[in-house]
Image: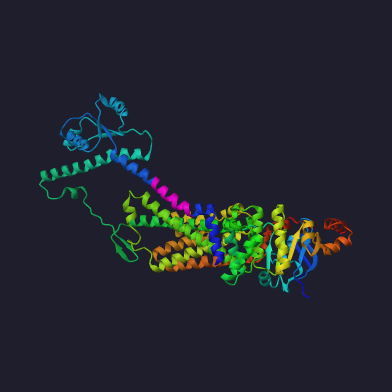
Amino acid sequence: MSLVVKEIKELIRDPKILIGVILMPIIIFPVMGSAINISTTSVQRAMITASFAIYNEDEGATTDALLGYLYTNNTVITIEANGIQDALTKYQETNASTLLWIKEGYSENVSQGLRGELKVYANLKSLSIAEAGSTDAIGSLLNYYGYFLSIANINSLLEQAGALGEANVVRSPLSVDYQSIIKGNVIDVAPSQIVSVIMSQSVMLPIMVMVMLMFAIQMAATSIAIEKEQKTLETLMTLPVSRLTILSGKLAGSIVVAVAGAIAYMIGFGYYMTSAFSFAPELTTMSTQDLSIGLEPLGTLLLGVNIFVTLVSGLALAISLATFTDNVRSAQSLTGFLTIPIMLPAIILMFSDLSMLPKTIQMVLLVIPYTHSIIASKAAFLGNYALVLRSIGYISVFTLVVLYIAARIFSTERIITARFTTFDIKKLLGRRSTRKR
Amino acid sequence: MQGAIEVSDLTKTFGDIVAIDGASFTVKNREIYGLIGPNGAGKTTTLRILSTLLKPSSGTARIFGNDVVKDPEEVREIISYLPEEAGAYQNLSGYEYLGFMAGFYAENKKSANEMLKEAEVISGLGERLDDRVKGYSKGMKRRLLLARALMMKPKLLILDEPTSSLDVVHAFHVRQMIKEYADKKGVTVLLSSHNMLEVEYLCHSVALINEGKVIAEGSPDELTKKFSAENLEQVFMEVAKLG
């Protein structure tokens, strides 16, 4: 126990680890979220406050009705000009983001049942998303106006024909209600919406697993390398305590800090999601629970077990690798290679399902234990517990093998000398001369 | 009578490199015994084998009757090893470090507290023990580590270059403590050094090691007389030439 406490103290008091693992996720995600929020709100504000200019060449009641609609509640600049070229020059001198040109004959066309011709010019100055949003403002106003104009037209036509019916129905004669069936239950939600929720879930999970593993690996590698770098390992190995206890102490300490890091990450990421997407409440209000694909107690338990064995396997692997180095920097660059087998399945499975991939890639991915961590996380959400258990089984076997190797390394003198690599190289080179010292 | 340490025909090779070449020596109970020799003579490797960190390629080494290969756990119970470049956990305070170490030896809280009190005296660091090790000077760190090694009163204390790179004041303090513990508390001490004058002052017996072999053994007095030398330094130079 004292080994675990010491390990945690050492790790948490290391400013690099405290900042990198615990403070960064808590700070960086909310900051990112706020930044996205600020920019998206400014887009919305730009849309709401967008001003536009109107150059009108037409006269008539229909045109007046359109102008009346546009002038109400909007900032409109009226352009007086001789011809469109002149109007464009004058428009560019204003701050208006768009210019609406009502062509001559608009009224006449509309009243005769023809299409009224309008033209919109957008002056793109900064090419930003906010600018695109503000140019959209006039478009939505016109669409809205066009809808009511069509309803009015249909109503008057229906009246003239003496026919029964509603203008809305004439305009859109079909009513389609989309429903989804999940695990045998019919749910009153469109499949496209469910897919988007599952998508966000399946993107989230691999990222979560990946980030947590990277934390754990960095931490365990650092904790061994620090012992070597600060020359404390030798002393530790001569204490009246078994090597396995030392190894377990290291693992447990790293797990505690890694879990703390994962929680910090989740808090930070949760805040990021709510602050970044607060403008789109429909994305966040629909949870997987509502769709009955949420986690049941057994699923939560299995997900926990899955994450735990994944962590232990990563830690054991990191410790085994770090024993071959003698300082923190080389330990971190050596364990950096582990990023590849961790990132690869996470990125691939973020965008696709294993079954969709070519056979050879499937085989490669299935050999990597971290693929199974992600598969198990997804399966836990969908209630496919057999698959979760199979994945946990695979990772556990892998973990046991790695732990066995780590324990072996810890119980030999290699942990002190880590010399056999150079020795092997020398052997390969065939240098047989006996040097004494 | 059984010796505290009995090393017989000890050999250790790393690949093609022979670090110890059939070394044999015996250390009596309650004695301060010095291994002296130049850098790379095999002193550290010998101490590491006796501390159960390395396994010998051949030969045997026993500590109070316990074989270092067959009974490493028993050996670790009775020894305390201080490596030459040992460090302490930077992010722990001196007290926390000593408390952590005492936890491995103390049977209960009371005996752990006694060890800590002992360590306070040995280190002589006073209130600085509340500070993180990170801020300690080299000398302070060495005193803390010596306190760690001595506080549990081991049967055998193994010290690798106990005063190397320390200034006069710290080196003096460390030597005083080693002598006091050996004389008054009955701790057997095995130390290595290339500082012959230090060894002459501290040790009851010494073994001169060169190229992994013990080339002479005896008390400093006996050796200087035998080789008609003024001090151990001259003895070593004489013997090394012969070897």
Q: Is residue A359 left or right of residue B83?
A: left
In the rendered structure, does residue A6 fall within the stretch colored magenta? no
* Colour pattern: rainbow
Between A91 and A235, the one nearer to me in the picture: A235
Is A63 drawn above or below residue A329 in the view shown?
Answer: above
A315 sits to left or right of B228: left
* Whether residue A415 is visible: no
Query: Could you tell whether A230 is left or right of A36 in the image?
Result: right
In which quadrant will I find the C terminus of chain A? bottom right
Camera sees residue A196: yes
Front one among A411 and A364: A411
Among the 4 quarters of the image, the one containing residue A56: top left
Residue placed at 43% from the left, 67% from the top?
Answer: A301
Instruction: State whether residue B178 is above or below residue A16.
Output: below
Q: Position of residue A285 (x, y in %)?
A: 32, 56
Q: State which quarter of the image contains the N terminus of chain A.
A: bottom right
Q: State the image coordinates of residue A336 (x, y, percent, origin top left).
A: 56, 53
- The part of the image, by quadrant, that contains residue B183 is bottom right
Which quadrant of the structure image shows residue B215? bottom right
> Residue A377's spot in the image, x, y percent?
44, 62
Over which residues does the magenta segment extend?
A22-35
